[in-house]
Image (cartoon, rainbow, N blue to C red):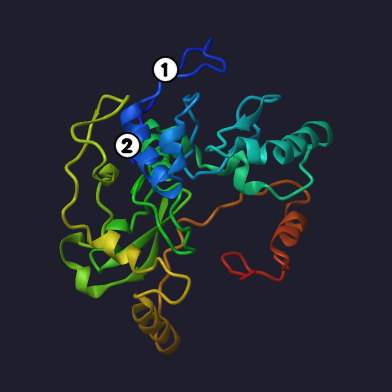
Amino acid sequence: QNPEFWPNVDPEFHFGLFDLDWDTFNQNLEGHIQRCPLIETLGIKSTVCGPESFTPDHKALVGPDVDLRGFVHCCGFNSMGMMLGGGVGREVASWIVDGSPTLDIFSMDVARFHPSSSRDDRWVEDRTHESYAKTYSVVFPHDEPLAGRSFRTSALYDTLLGHGCVYQSRQGFERPGWFDPSLAANHAAECKEYDFYGAYEETVSGLDRAVPTAHEEHAYHQLIEGECTFGWGKNVTLVEEECVAARNGVVVFDQSYFGKFFLEGPEAMQAADWLCTAKMGDSRPIGGVAYT
């Protein structure tokens, strides 16, 4: 969990290698010998040690750049380049020649990140470290990152925290997940500053950045651990109470994190109908809402 960042890569480093860190390698070698004892007597003929590229969400960076027309990305494969290279190469070729890939690869589209997040070095560094640290972790459907939090918040962020709001991260935006009234005091449900899981002692290797003291208690982390399951999470009873309250009373949703589309032009309304698969035209009064 303690990789060394390399912020200033030499452009001439193509296919270069590093000297192997035997202290780190031996941690894996010991386990290897336990499973295959013959390795201990055969020895190691050669080793390969080089840099690897990781991304904030552990997915590749693929497709046209969001700012520079004609520049296409195909990188950041998170140690999966040999596995994904053939298929992704085919899709990139189609993207360049025909204007779009043949498959839905939005999860790899370089445009998937919100600019306010992807252009912030701190957010990229923290999220990328966590994606590396959790490389071999089980991917649970309702897990949440601890890194890169509170970068984008609504005007109600502190108010909802004061009521025990447990936030989730979407596109770098903090959206309400559910409420735990027992954590309403002192914003106890807030995700604390990322501590790199205690992997560094003083500074982040390669970044010369001070590391916050590892959290001895982190209520948000414990809450999310309770959601790391393929069944119902530990907090489902709280969600159930909210659903009942919404059905029998009045509820207000903070949907600030939703996307906003500003359409203009002679066919703007037809475009809105097509995007929303609903009639958004004259039948809707100004200020009206259509759920699509």
The residue wearing badge 2 is: 2
Nearer to us in this view, 80 or 106: 80
The amino acid sitting under disc 2 is Asn
- Assign a secondary structure to mark 2: loop
Where does the image place residue 31, in percent across and percent down from the top left? 38, 45
- Measuring 45% from the left and 17% from the top, which residue is drawn there? 9
Q: Quadrant of the C terminus?
A: bottom right
| Residues at discs 2 and 1 in contact (Cβ within 8 Å) | no
Q: Residue furthest top?
A: 12
Q: Nearer the viewer, mark 2 or mark 1?
A: 2
- Measuring 59% from the left and 39% from the top, which residue is drawn there? 111
Nearer to us in this view, 283 or 260: 260
The residue wearing badge 1 is: 8
Distance from disc 2 to disc 1, alpha carbons, whole Å, reads 18 Å
Crowding around mark 1 (Cα neighbors within 10 Å: few <14, some 14 to 19, many 20+) is few
Apparent side of residue 111 relative to residue 100 in the rendered image (left or right): left
Where does the image place residue 208, in percent across and percent down from the top left? 26, 24
The amino acid sitting under disc 1 is Asn
